[in-house]
Amino acid sequence: MVVEVGYAQGWDPEARAPWRPISAREARERDVTGLPYVVVYREPGREAPLEVRLVSWRDHYVGLWVYDAQGRRTYDLDMRVLDAPSRLLRRYICDGPPAGPPPAGLADPGRGAGKP
């Protein structure tokens, strides 16, 4: 499987698309300075991303969202950096495919309204 990697300043959960794409070089700069950015993993020809990693070191945050082929978020991991940069606290994890078809009108049908 070929996986394409892209970077952006943010993620639009409704469109399931990168917001303000950036280069790998700019993503590295943002990483070093602690500014937020996202890493998007895609398979060529697939509309929905494979996964999205949300990073904001200044906010002590790392998130992971995994999508199925229908664009539903099926895995959600939220981690916070603890006192030592090498230690992460797993705040919550949600996994498993959603039951039934997604309700119409939800911003992210994988997990429902109210989730970032």
Image (cartoon, grey):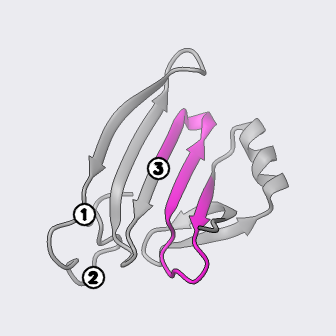
Alpha carbon separation for disc pair 1 and 2:
18 Å
Q: Tell me, yes or no, whether the highlighted magenta stretch contains residue 50.
A: yes
Circle 2 crowding by C-alpha within 10 Å: few under 14, some 14–19, many from 20: few
Q: Residue furthest right?
A: 25
Where disc 1 sits, the SS reads: loop
Look at 28% across and 51% down and name the residue there. 95
Residue 48 screen position, x and y as percent? 48, 76
Quadrant housing residue 112: bottom left
Residue 96 screen position, x and y as percent? 25, 56
Quadrant housing residue 111: bottom left
**Identity, as a three-letter code, of the amino acid under mark 1:** Pro
- Circle nearer the N terminus (1, 2): 1
**Identity, as a three-letter code, of the amino acid under mark 3:** Leu
Circle 1 crowding by C-alpha within 10 Å: few under 14, some 14–19, many from 20: some
Alpha carbon separation for disc pair 3 and 2:
23 Å
Q: Tell me, yes or no, whether the highlighted magenta stretch contains residue 34.
A: no
Judged by depth in the image, the label closer to the viewer, 1 or 2, is 1
Q: Residue furthest top?
A: 84
Q: Tags 1 and 2 in contact by the CB under 8 Å rule?
A: no
Q: Is residue 17 above or below residue 57?
A: below
How many numbered circles does the render carry?
A: 3
Disc 1 marks which residue? 97
In the rendered structure, the answer to whether residue 95 lies left or right of residue 38 reads: left
Disc 2 marks which residue? 105
Quadrant housing residue 97: bottom left
Disc 3 marks which residue? 64
Where disc 3 sits, the SS reads: strand
Residue range (magenta) = 38-63
Look at 75% across and 46% down and name the residue there. 30
